[in-house]
Image (tube, rainbow, N blue to C red):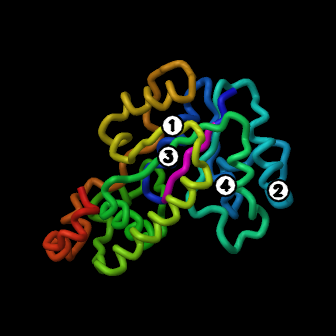
């Protein structure tokens, strides 16, 4: 069995990738194993997350139930600093035999930031299929403070680099949100080959939430567009 982890930040398509991979007949993909809350997709059969160590959780998850590949989603900021249960989660993750890493990022950082701000404003990160938030008239607009955005980029980049150092040397595949959104079939084929599972068509388990342009989402987009420093992170 191939053990894998999807390492990602918020609003990079990690839920889309994880839930879609879980539709593959030879893949089992869990959600945020080290999230502080019990979620529908992060519970591992036979082990209680409240008392289990990081090592025990990983051992239970990767024991396998017959799939050719098994993995989960690891957000760069988890476990939370306030979470005392799994202080060595990244160290234990690195020690998983044969682990492969899917690094998922987003090239358009301004779009990522805007998506995160809209989710925070609405309180909805993963709307259900018929949620009214899929309709543009029900999605809020935001104003972006340039200094706050640049500070956020620096913080997220530093966190990602820390995780890359912690998992350095492991077999890895680089992916981007834009690859999933624009070249779904070919990107999924790359992922399947990396995980050594049969290449089969898998429909996306989620659909894109934001149908508006950045100029429609960000009220002060015109101001941002005049800043070369800001725009180096856009598009």
Quarter occupied by the N terminus: top right
Across and down, in percent, residue 130 comes to 42, 50
User: Label 3 neighbourhood size at 10 Å, few (<14), some (14-19), many (20+)?
Assistant: some
- Between the residue at mark 4 and the residue at mark 2, the CA separation in whole angstroms equals 18 Å
Whether 97 is drawn above or below 1: the answer is below
Across and down, in percent, residue 93 comes to 70, 48
Residue 53: which numbered mark, if any? 2
Residue 5 falls left or right of residue 47: left
- Between the residue at mark 4 and the residue at mark 1, the CA separation in whole angstroms equals 17 Å
Residue 217 occupies quadrant: bottom left
The residue under label 4 is: 39
Residue 137 occupies quadrant: bottom left
Residue 103: which numbered mark, if any? 3
Q: Earlier in the sequence, mark 2 or mark 3?
A: 2
Query: Which callout, 2 or 3, points to the residue nearer the camera?
Result: 3
Residue appearing at x 31%, y 61% in the figure: 111
User: Camera-side residue: 32 or 156?
Assistant: 156
Residue appearing at x 60%, y 52% in the figure: 74
The residue under label 1 is: 20
């Amino acid at each position: 069995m191939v053990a894998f982890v999807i390492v990602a930040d918020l609003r990079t398509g990690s839920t889309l990738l994880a839930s879609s991979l879980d539709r593959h007949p030879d893949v089992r993909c869990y959600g945020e194993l080290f999230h502080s809350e019990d979620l529908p997709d992060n519970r591992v059969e036979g082990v209680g997350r409240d008392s289990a160590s990081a090592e025990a959780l990983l051992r239970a998850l990767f024991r396998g139930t017959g799939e050719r590949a098994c993995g989960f989603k690891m957000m760069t900021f988890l476990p939370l600093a306030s979470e005392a249960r799994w202080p060595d989660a990244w160290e234990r993750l690195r020690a998983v035999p044969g682990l492969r890493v899917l690094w998922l990022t987003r090239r358009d950082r301004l779009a990522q930031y805007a998506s995160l701000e809209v989710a925070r404003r609405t309180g909805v990160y993963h709307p259900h299929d018929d949620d009214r938030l899929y309709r543009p008239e029900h999605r809020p607009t935001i104003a972006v403070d340039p200094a706050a955005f640049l500070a956020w980029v620096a913080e997220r980049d530093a966190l990602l680099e820390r995780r890359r150092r912690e998992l350095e040397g492991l077999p890895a595949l680089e992916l981007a949100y834009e690859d999933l959104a624009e070249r779904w079939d070919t990107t999924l084929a790359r992922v399947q080959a990396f995980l050594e599972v049969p290449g089969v068509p898998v429909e996306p388990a989620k659909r894109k939430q934001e149908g508006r342009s950045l100029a429609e989402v960000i009220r002060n987009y015109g101001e941002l567009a005049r800043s070369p420093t800001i725009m180096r992170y856009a598009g």
